[in-house]
Amino acid sequence: MIRSDVSEKRNPATVSLNADLVVVGGGLSGTCCAITAARAGIRVILVTDRPVLGGNASSEVRLWVLGATSHMGNNNRWAREGGVLDELLVENMYRNPEGNPLIFDTVILEKVVQEPNITLLLNTAVHDLEKSDPDTISKVFAFCSQNSTSYELSAPLFCDASGDGIVGFLAGAAFRMGAESSEEFGEKFAPSQEYGELLGHSMYFYSKDTGKPVRFVPPNYAIDVTKEVPRFRRFTAKEQGCQLWWLEYGGRLDTVHDTEKIKWELWKVVYGVWDYIKNSGEFPEAETMTLEWVGTIPGKRESRRFEGDYMLIQQDIVEQRSHYDDVAYGGWSIDLHPADGVFSEKPGCNQWHSKGLYGIPYRSYYSRNIKNLFLAGRIISASHVAFGSARVMATSAYGGQAVGMAAVLCTQQGLLPRDFSSPEKITQLQQELQKRGQHIPGLQLHDPLDLVQEAQLTASSELVLTELTEDTEPRPMVYSVAQLLPVAAGRFPALIVHPYAAEATTLEVELRLSSRPENHTPDVVIATQTLALQPGRNCMKLEFDVTIAEPTYAFLVFRKNEQVAFRYSNTRITGVLSVFNLVNAAVSNYGKQEPTEDIGVDAFEFWCPQRRPEGLNLALKIAEGLTAFGVENLRNGLQRPTNHPNAYVADLTDPKPEVTLRWNEKQLIRRIELAFDADFDHPMENVLMTHPESIMPFCVQRFQILDENGNVLAKEQANHQTLRTLVLEEPIATRQLTIQLEHPSATVPAALLEVRVY
């Protein structure tokens, strides 16, 4: 029994905690930051004011995680973000291809709670802080309403990943809110005040069919969307969840302090939408449908942006500028919305893409005036226009991983965030990130401790691609089609294709490259041919009198002709892909980006893959064969097919593919790290969408590693992840390691992206 006498005043229970890093905000950026730092050995407190992790990706909001892949609607190939975020998305795909948001909650939470170096505080809101001097935070104060406990959280380093920047705000960090003028940074896409300076919040709903008639009586606060929402005719009974991203409001209010007011307005809209769907008579299919879920907190897009030593701007994105201190990348379009949101007469978004990925510098990830404050998520140092691209969750999480590793190195070396921005320090940060799967455009991993760099590499076979077999019936050209082929330097190989013509016609063929070797926008035409086709099957040999300067991807383009059809191949190979000049209106892709005025963006065509089970490779033959899949790719410092496959691929006829590493002297080996192909081209949308597979078709599921005596050091029968770190129970001394692989299927050869040994 507890009995307390009358007291003038009581204080809640108080708990004091210390760590090396306090991360405030449990969205994907804060979560990936915390996991990255904890795995690298420092003590982390992760504190969030929500009952679940994931932020806008959680079951509370239910927005799908996207970044550079942009629903496969842009030209950024193999661009899904790596590292911890990749691990989360791949695991969710394995467990949850149906896109259940509750399951994604469990995937994120599991990854956090299994880290012994993380202390997790849910339902705990930071409300105050203390400084040791005007520029240094010493502790933050937080309160958990669920256990009526106050927390004092102390650390030498802090990361604000809270979305609204509560720590930076309380600490006095320099910040901005609203849009800069076009004159300040020369950004031609800077919005007018009429368009609005802030993006609003959104709220979603889910519906389900009950199989029997269901009434809906709207609450009295529901609005009549036919009178108040200009685009009300866009509503359908089929769209739900974040497909209704344009249910947006609040861009002309204070998106921090007016959030509750914005929430109520969005509730009025949501219930008004459902009233319209259920009771207008326009949707007879809705008679048996009911509301299953409505959000209770809005998903926020924009509020404060804090100033670092570098501010990302429009030109960084469009020109794909590189910076000496790039630690992350973006690739979502510059995506600005009218401030009036759902009540605007204007389109719900205004998206403009760049031709490829752009780097985000480390100097954008810490405060310029609070010495020990890192920034992560949508609050990083960027202009309003650049924020329109960098704000999306996968890009935000990727930056969070960079911050987590920077915090580790700062802790180990007794430094502050700015100290690590020097050129001599930043290389160390970049290398540590790359070791953990963080691709940084333009950089390769050079690890002198990796024993593979001194090994002799051999393989039982290496793929030489001579043919993509004809496996389907002829398929008409609904779109122009191109086959990406990884070609070597030298004369372009002769090709044989078999177009089928319904009547005598001609077919335009182009050979294209990208103007930048790391891009996949085929904007340079280097050769053209016109093929004269006869009715039926045609056997055409394509010879181009061109020389390729360096290993790259070439695009063999066939311009649309509805009288022509091609057969396709069921064979799928790492680094080989078909793309189509198709439309993806969801990301403002209408086949070609054509700005009607000078807003500082480029005009170019979109060439995008089709989602599986579609998206087969074009059937063709290659006279000399493509030899881009050799075993030496395993140590070239690249873990994805960017400018080339960058992978070892076995011959599909090899019954037991294996890679052997040999050294002249015995090596003491403790750890082996492997990188597999979990298809970086797949966006892996985590909610709402249903995906046809739970394991990527390129991913080797069964493998084992043997020493020089044939002893099995490690064995896996059900792999689905990209990165596998194998730590041996006891170090072994051996002159040889053999990695035995099994083909993922009869039509997909075994591939391995990287091997590192320590």
Image (cartoon, rainbow, N blue to C red):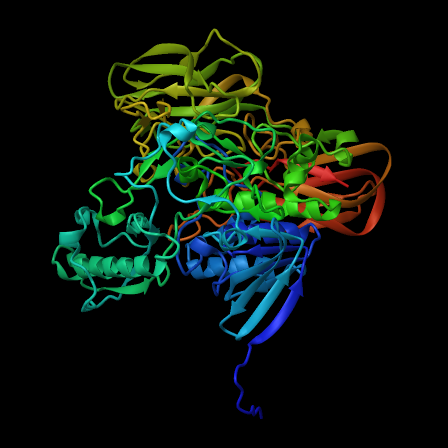
- The answer to which image quadrant residue 333 occupies is top left
The one of 231 and 290 positioned closer to us in this rendering: 231
Q: Residue at x 55, y 92 (%)?
A: 5
| Residue 435 in view, yes or no | yes
**In the depicted structure, whether residue 381 falls above or below residue 184:** below
| Residue 701 in view, yes or no | no
Q: Residue 95: image x %, image y %?
A: 50, 56
Relative to 2, is 20 on the left or the right? right
- The answer to which image quadrant residue 142 occupies is bottom right
The one of 178 and 99 positioned closer to us in this rendering: 178
User: Outermost residue, left direction?
Assistant: 281
Q: Residue 380: image x %, image y %?
A: 50, 43
Q: Residue 489: image x %, image y %?
A: 58, 14
**In the depicted structure, whether residue 405 falls above or below residue 299:** above
**In the depicted structure, whether residue 79 falls above or below residue 507:** below
Q: Residue at x 34, y 61 (%)?
A: 260
- The answer to which image quadrant residue 112 occupies is bottom right
Q: Residue at x 83, y 43 (%)?
A: 709
Q: Residue 122: image x %, image y %?
A: 53, 65
Q: Quadrant of the N terminus?
A: bottom right
The one of 627 and 317 positioned closer to us in this rendering: 317
User: Outermost residue, top direction?
Assistant: 545
